[in-house]
Every structure is written in structure tokens, then in C-alpha cells.
Amino acid sequence: MNTYMQTHKFLIQKNIKPSVQRTAVMEYLMINRVHPTVDEIYLALSPDMPTLSKTTVYNTLDLLVRKGAAQMLLIDEKNARYDADISKHGHFICQSCGKVSDIFNLKPELFEIPKHPQYTINTVEISYTGICNECKSN
């Protein structure tokens, strides 16, 4: 089965009506594990979808996040980034090149939501910053 059809089925499982635009955005996230911004997704998809707007990409990503099909990462002060992997994992952000990478070998208890008397905590997001090996070697 091709990735378009797999993505189509995945959206249906998440109770999302799989329009051409929604399927294309989700498929892009699933194939390109680079934690893209709205602009990056739009620039990648618009050449093949001339009727696609940046607003459609934004609204689609908002829907994907609300339905649990993707997650929004607020690790960049300029742009939100998006990740199709909704499993519990952390992120590493290179301070030199800006690349965002997944970190999976974290202790599960780091993701437990703490109880706090003054706050209702809904999510835990773990990110680390530093210099990636590629930038270190340059």
C-alpha cells in the first residue's frame, strides 16, 4: 500500500476527514521527520498543489494536533514546529544549525504529569539544546 493510502487510513482512524490537503500535510509529516514549520510544509507542498494556502496548512496542522495525529513543538521562539510522532520522546535542538532531532532513550518517568496544587498540567515537553555532531565537526 502506498504512503498516500496509509496516511488516508490513518486520518480516518483519528476521526479526521481525509481531504487531499489534509492527507498531503500528514503524509509530509510522516515522511519528513524534520519537525517542519508551517512555512516549510507550505513551501514543500505548494508546487504540486497550487490551490494550497498557508492558512490551509495552518488549519490542517491545528486539526491534526487537536485530534492527536501530530504534536506541536514550541521549542523555537520564532515558529512552532510539528511532529508526526506522538509517542513520548524528547527533542534536541542544535543551537548552531537549528536542526531538531528526536531523542527516544529517555526515562519514562520524565513524561509523567506531576500533580501541582496551583496548576492543572496537561502535557510534558522535553527538549535539550546544544551543538549537534555535524556542527561540531565543521
Image (tube, rainbow, N blue to C red):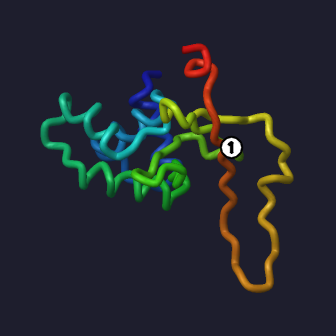
Q: In this view of the protein, can residue 80 be seen by the observer? A: yes
Q: Position of residue 72 (x, y in %)?
A: 51, 53
Residue type at mark 1 is Gly
Instruction: Please tell me which residue is depicted at 54% across the width and 14% down the height of the picture.
Output: 138
Where, by quadrant of the figure, is residue 107 drawn? top right
**Residue extending farthest left:** 50
Where, by quadrant of the figure, is residue 28 drawn? top left
Mark 1 nearby-residue class (10 Å; few <14, some 14–19, many ≥20): some
- In the image, taking residue 38 as reference, residue 47 lies left or right, namely left
Name the residue beneath numbered marker 1: 90
Q: Position of residue 33 (x, y in %)?
A: 51, 31
Q: Position of residue 48 (x, y in %)?
A: 20, 29
**Residue extending farthest bottom:** 118
Number of numbered discs visible in the structure rendering: 1
Instruction: Please tell me which residue is depicted at 28% across the width and 43% down the height of the picture.
Output: 21
- In the image, taking residue 3 as reference, residue 21 lies left or right, namely left
Instruction: Please tell me which residue is depicted at 30% across the width and 46% down the height of the picture.
Output: 19
Q: In this view of the protein, can residue 69 be seen by the observer? A: no
- In the image, taking residue 114 as reference, residue 61 lies left or right, namely left
**Residue extending farthest top:** 137
Relative to 54, is 67 above or below?
A: below
Relative to 118, is 95 above or below?
A: above
Relative to 52, is 62 above or below?
A: below
> In this orientation, which residue lies closer to the viewer: 42 or 127?
127
Q: Position of residue 62 (x, y in %)?
A: 41, 58
Task: Indicate the secondary structure of the residue bearing disc 1.
Answer: strand
> In this orientation, which residue lies closer to the viewer: 99 or 115?
99
